[in-house]
């Protein structure tokens, strides 16, 4: 399973639900909270990914990190990918 | 200086501060002397409100602070109307509290913080007037709305003494410079206000209606070193980088469960700050604070409680508090705020884990989404309006970002086969009829829902 693609697809669906239309694909240095997602939307993204991937890295990490960019966010999921359980 | 002593009234506290002490930062600094002169200029107007039951409402936080300062000790009761209260609630609360005059600030911009507009209102049923039971000359009753335990907001009556019971004036030097991110008409905002005002420490105002980066810029410009916010707001600050440059010495978390992850992240981001998470209930005044940087609270608080309060846990795991300063009560309604021995049921569930008690959430199933309370029944009713839904269950889903989110399980009506379409219809209907924090983050379809022996839907996740 491609974690990065799952994340980008889920984020895209969520933004579309909220009426946000992206005029260009998201790049790794895009700021998460400026993609059209507020902190509530970010929380929704994390639980939807938990349902798809089987883990929430923010509950697993021993050293808590709150990502600022899309790239950092994807990297956190990739770091914890040994927890993937296909839902 | 004021310690646990009964604070007389805000005027008296102001009078004890040196004239050159900066107290409020609203773009520029206002000293205690400025505030004393402002009050003196309006002494005649304030005197006309003696023994009146006053409702105060303004979106401008500095103006609200000025009105509180002017009216505490002057009027008989003081109803605080939060800025985000819908108009029909304003009328209802005003009526229930028996307020006979509404005080607001002028609509146009003015340099005079103490300028007030008085508007007479129908005081409602005289017997409902909280203050009617009170003789003139006693401490002003502060009437504060709470979101209540069953969905209907309650009005809780306090005095300055019950509100400031656990405020510890800071002896830190230099004095902390507190930032205000909350609405002052809410309990969390009042705590920050009292903490700074009683200590004679500057309070930096921000406009809660503005985006977070703008609020943080105001705090940075004001030299903020102490800040109180919900865990959700702190996570947002860490993610957005807003506030990363603040030289914070004191960090306070409240309004939601503070988990180990956010506490650890704040320690890393602000290594020089003391980190405190507070458990507070509008009913009880303030609850208690935890300063050891760990989640939950020490089990040893039951035997050796923090000052101003006693703590117990009943057989169901519900947290009970007994304040050592009595005197708070519900303004109306049949429910007593405390049992005959003075214990207040907080409605919060806790679980013992080793030497700690950890918070589990609300006993009544209310979901705390980033500090906003959601009652599952309200969301279930909205979902049941959707064609094709036979039954709906709404419950809390744990979130590492906002503490909890709303999750819905729907049972389709007979003949409904397109489950994806049903999920989309439920989501669209909820988005159209509910604020974002009440809209289910996850909607799933199930063929049946477990029901308890009483016929009620089971909300506890198996």
Image (cartoon, rainbow, N blue to C red):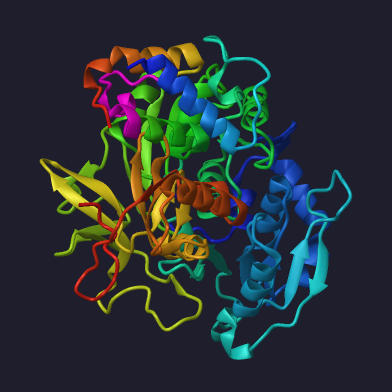
* Magenta range: A50-65
Q: Considering only vertical position in the picture, is B269 above or below B446?
A: above
Q: Quadrant of residue A79?
A: top left
**Figure check: B17 above or below A31:** below
Q: Is residue A2 left or right of residue A18?
A: left
| Point 81% across, 60% down: residue | B116
Name the residue rendered at 54%, 64% in the picture: B144
Quick check: B163 above or below B292? below
Q: Find residue B319 and report its horizontal and vertical position in percent.
A: 25, 59
Residue at 36% x, 15% y is: A2
Name the foreground residue: B146 vs B168.
Answer: B146
| Residue B238 appears left or right of B22 | left
Q: Residue at x 55, y 70 (%)?
A: B139
Is B103 contained in the magenta span? no
Which percent across, then down, holds residue B296? 26, 42
Q: Say whether residue B108 is visible.
A: yes
Q: Position of residue B440 (x, y in %)?
A: 46, 48
Q: Seen in the image, is B346 located left or right of residue B94? A: left
Q: Is residue A10 left or right of residue B105?
A: left
- Magenta-span inclusion, residue A63: yes
Q: Is residue B439 visible?
A: no
| Residue B205 drawn at (x, y percent) | 66, 38
């Amino acid at each position: 399973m491609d974690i990065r693609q799952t994340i980008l697809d889920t984020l895209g669906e969520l933004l579309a639900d909220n009426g946000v239309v992206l005029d260009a694909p998201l790049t790794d240095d895009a700021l998460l909270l400026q993609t059209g997602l507020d902190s509530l939307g970010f929380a929704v993204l994390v639980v939807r990914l938990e349902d798809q991937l089987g883990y929430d890295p923010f509950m697993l990490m021993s050293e808590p990190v709150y990502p600022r960019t899309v790239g950092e966010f994807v990297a956190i999921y990739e770091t914890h990918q040994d927890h993937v359980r296909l839902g | 200086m004021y310690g646990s002593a009964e604070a007389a009234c805000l005027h008296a506290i102001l009078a004890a501060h040196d004239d050159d002490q900066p107290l409020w930062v609203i773009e520029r600094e206002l000293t205690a002397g400025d505030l004393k002169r402002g009050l003196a200029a309006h002494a005649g107007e304030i005197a006309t409100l003696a023994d009146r039951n006053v409702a105060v409402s303004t979106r401008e936080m500095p103006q609200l602070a000025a009105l509180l300062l002017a009216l505490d000790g002057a009027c008989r009761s003081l109803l605080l109307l939060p800025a985000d209260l819908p108009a029909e609630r304003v009328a209802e609360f005003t009526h229930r509290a028996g307020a006979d005059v509404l005080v607001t600030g002028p609509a146009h911009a003015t340099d005079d913080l103490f300028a007030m507009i008085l508007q007479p209102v129908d005081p409602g049923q005289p017997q409902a007037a909280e203050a009617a039971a009170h003789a003139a000359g006693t401490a002003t009753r502060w009437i504060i709305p709470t979101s209540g335990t069953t969905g209907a907001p309650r009005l809780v009556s306090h005095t300055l003494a019950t509100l400031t019971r656990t405020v510890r004036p800071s002896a830190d030097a230099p004095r902390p410079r507190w930032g205000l991110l909350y609405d002052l008409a809410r309990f969390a905002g009042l705590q920050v206000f009292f903490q700074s005002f009683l200590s004679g420490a500057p309070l930096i105002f921000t406009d809660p209606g503005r985006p977070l980066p703008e609020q943080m810029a105001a705090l940075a410009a004001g030299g903020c070193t102490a800040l109180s916010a919900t865990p959700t707001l702190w996570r947002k600050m860490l993610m957005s980088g807003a506030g990363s440059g603040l030289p914070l010495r004191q960090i306070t978390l409240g309004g939601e469960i503070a988990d180990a992850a956010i506490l650890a992240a704040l320690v890393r981001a602000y290594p020089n700050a003391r980190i405190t998470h507070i458990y507070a209930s509008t009913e009880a005044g303030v609850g208690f604070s935890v300063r050891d940087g760990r989640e939950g609270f020490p089990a040893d608080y039951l035997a050796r409680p923090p000052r101003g309060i006693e703590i117990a846990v009943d057989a169901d795991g519900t947290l009970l508090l007994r304040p050592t300063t009595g005197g708070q009560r519900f303004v109306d309604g049949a429910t007593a705020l405390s049992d005959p021995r003075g214990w207040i049921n907080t409605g919060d569930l806790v679980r013992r884990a080793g030497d700690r008690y950890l918070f589990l959430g609300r006993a009544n199933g209310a979901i705390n989404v980033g500090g906003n309370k959601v009652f599952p029944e309200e969301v279930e009713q909205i979902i049941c309006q959707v064609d094709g839904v036979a039954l709906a269950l709404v419950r809390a889903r744990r979130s590492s970002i906002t503490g909890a989110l709303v999750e819905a399980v729907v049972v389709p009506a007979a003949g409904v086969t397109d489950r994806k379409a049903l999920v989309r219809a439920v989501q669209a209907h909820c988005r159209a009829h509910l604020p974002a924090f009440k809209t289910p983050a996850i909607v799933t379809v199930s063929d049946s829902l477990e029901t308890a022996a009483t016929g009620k839907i089971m909300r506890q996740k198996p």
